[in-house]
Amino acid sequence: MKYKLCEWEDNGYHDSYFYGVYYDTDDGLMHSCGLGATAYGGGVSPAWQECQYPSLEIVERARLLLADHIFTVIRAAEHSDVMDPEDAKVGEVLQLLVPHTRQLKKVIPCHRCMGKCYWQNPRDPKDRRKCFACDGTGAFAKGDAIRDANGKISRETIPEGTRLTTLKVIAYGSFYRKGYNKPGRENRTVTGRTDAGDVISIPLKKLRLARDPMSDSELRERAATLSHDHQYGAMFGCRAWLSDNYAAAAVAKAKAAA
Ligand SMILES: [Zn+2]
């Protein structure tokens, strides 16, 4: 037996196409089918013509499948947000995925605070704030490269796993609102402070979030909550509002009767 769950309209530039999702007890799965288009007459799938309105029991079977699907999607998104973030926010803690080697440069004292690291309100002795210019580091690492006795540039390797609290994120390159070149993991650089207090800049592609991804049980719980919206179209590429949600209607009807 087949039971209809929802339908929607995909409005194209010239024509609209209609789709539906049904649950089939023969294979215990959901399927989508075409319900016609303005481009041609007819086109309602024979499967859809067989469909009945769903009972609560059928809706619940479909909802469990939807929850599994949502879990798979949000689990992948959560893991990529943590392991390959596309951006970072000020204050967010990141962690080096690989060691990062940098040239050591002569550190010049911050000319705002003269290396004192703080700003003192001249009218209020109690008002002392972190220097805004150097972010309280008291220094700018903007001088010439430091060289050893042989004239070779000194380098430092920051080990994998080093934690960095984000102070600033800069994207390098030209970006266009609709262009292919968008700010992201490949062209952003994060300036942050290590737990030891050093301020360093690291390409975002070498960083992950320092937190663990949400656990599978948390993600399953979230997926279960979301599945109660009965958005079955999303499993089949629907990005529009549903024109009919038979599953949600069955649940609402049962609730009203209870
Ligand atoms: Zn300063």
Image (spheres, rainbow, N blue to C red):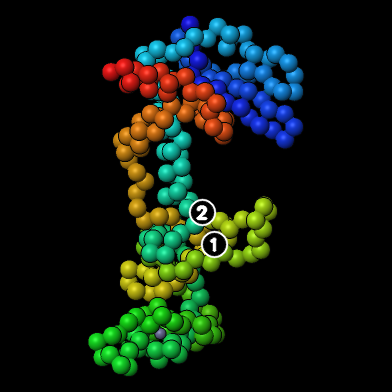
Q: Quadrant of ligand 1?
A: bottom left
Residue bearing mark 1: 188
Residue 142 drawn at (x, y percent): 51, 82
Residue bearing mark 2: 86
Residue type, mark 1 in image: Arg
Residue type, mark 2 in image: Glu
Residue 252 drawn at (x, y percent): 37, 22
Q: Which mark is residue 149?
A: none
87, above or below 121, in the image: above
- Report the front residue among 73 and 246: 246
118, above or below 227, in the image: below
238, above or below 136, in the image: above
The quarter holding residue 222 reads: top left
- Report the front residue among 4 and 67: 4
Residue 87 drawn at (x, y percent): 49, 57
Looking at the image, which residue is at 50% across and 60% down? 204
Q: Secondary structure at mark 1?
A: strand
Taking the image as drawn, is residue 211 in sight?
A: yes
Looking at the image, which residue is at 57% across and 33% down? 240
Q: Residues within 10 Å of mark 2 (few under 14, many from 20)?
A: some
181, above or below 55, in the image: below
Left or right for 6, reference 163: right
Instruction: List the single residue furthest toward the front.
Output: 256
Q: Do callouts 2 and 1 mark residues in contact (Cβ within 8 Å)?
A: yes
Q: How many marks?
A: 2
Left or right for 242, reference 35: left
Looking at the image, which residue is at 56% across and 30% down? 238
The quarter holding residue 114 reads: bottom left
Q: Earlier in the sequence, mark 2 or mark 1?
A: 2
